[in-house]
Image (cartoon, rainbow, N blue to C red):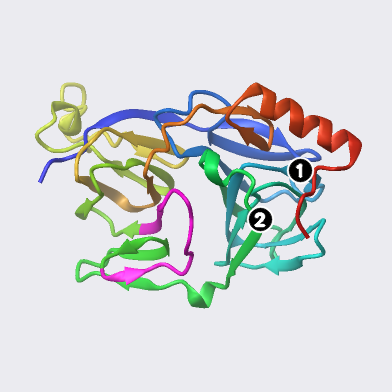
Amino acid sequence: MSLRPVKQILQTKPTIEGAGVKLQRAFGFGKTAEFDPFLLLDDFRNENPADYLAGFPWHPHRGIETITYVLAGEVAHGDSLGNKGLMTAGDVQWMTAGSGILHQEMPKGDERGRMHGFQLWANLPAALKMTDPRYQDIPSSAIPEVTEDDGTRARIICGEFWGKKGPVEGVAADPSYVDISVPPNQRKRIKVETTRNAFAYVFAGLGSFRDASDPQAVLTESAVDPGAEPAYDAKNHSLVLFDRGDEIVVQAGPEGIRFLLVSGKPLEEPVAWYGPIVMNTQAELRQAMTELQNGSFIRHG
């Protein structure tokens, strides 16, 4: 086994999207090679309804797949093809925008006003950019969960993991998307296919993804405070980008740690994008914008 070193640890950046929704962006609208085939990850977590109720009114998508995972509250969605529905806590929607769709998402908090969810964008290869749009709406009850003997829990949204297969299928980048909780002070080794790009996004607790053989993994403040705990470098709102290898290791802190573990096969194609439209060339982008203006953007339905 070869351990994946930690290439970089990033902190989210406050961002405003839609009609004024305040969220935290883990990555997006920058370099794409290290995250390929993924383009963007947003954490829309808020306890103040005024910061999210304006939602994400009608907007176009083309050339990508959007993956929405709701943990608290609910999201009403609809599109230009007449599809509509309601996502509640634990639900997932995997939307293949393909050739183009107009879409809206309107969040609503739970009984305490809390809203929490994630949206991940996955790129489509050039051969599938103009495929028919489709939805995979997955209720929470359909997402398999596995609990290991040490108490580590995993919800498998997409891909195969610990003998279970997630309900999302037929996605171009063949991704793996798992919600993992490791109990306090536990150490866990998790396999990740070597050929994939992979990252972990921490949204509760804290810990470290560095191996004990790495000097940075065992840093302490003992020089200043002999009784100090080890320095945990992955905490809430941390994105951990891994280098190559076939497994990762996570050491949970005293509160435990919960994170999304996402990996996918890189497409290694040129990326040209403007907001929620992602193509391979600037000419394709210009064509998409022209079609938006003249009313020919929607090709199917």
Tell which circle, 2 or 1, labels the residue nearer the N-terminal end. 1
Q: Is residue 72 left or right of residue 102?
A: left
Secondary structure beneath label 2 = loop
Q: Nearer the viewer, residue 286 or 208?
A: 286
Q: Is residue 227 left or right of residue 71?
A: left
Magenta-highlighted stretch: main secondary structure?
A: loop
Asked if residue 300 is among those painted magenta in the image, a careful observer would answer no
**Of all residues shown, which one is farthest toward the front?**
127
From the viewer's perspective, is residue 102 above or below residue 166?
Answer: above
Asked if residue 171 is among those painted magenta in the image, a careful observer would answer yes
Q: Is residue 32 left or right of residue 106?
A: left
**Start-end of magenta stretch:** 163-180
Q: Which image quadrant is residue 96 in?
A: bottom right
Label 2 and label 1: CA atoms lie apart by: 14 Å
Q: Which image quadrant is residue 165 in?
A: bottom left
Amino acid type at mark 2: Asp
Secondary structure beneath label 1 = strand
Q: Which residue is mark 2?
A: 132
**Few, some or many residues within 10 Å of mark 1 (<14, 14–19, 20+):** some
Residue 164, percent from left and from top: 32, 71
| Residue shown at 24% from the left, 69% from the top | 148
Q: Which residue is mark 1?
A: 60
Q: Nearer the viewer, residue 236 or 27?
A: 27
**Few, some or many residues within 10 Å of mark 2 (<14, 14–19, 20+):** some
Residue 225, percent from left and from top: 20, 27
Residue 115 makes an appearance in the image: yes
Q: Which image quadrant is residue 34 in?
A: top left
Amino acid type at mark 1: Pro
Q: How many marks?
A: 2
Residue 124 makes an appearance in the image: no
Residue 19, percent from left and from top: 81, 40
| Residue shown at 62% from the left, 51% from the top | 131
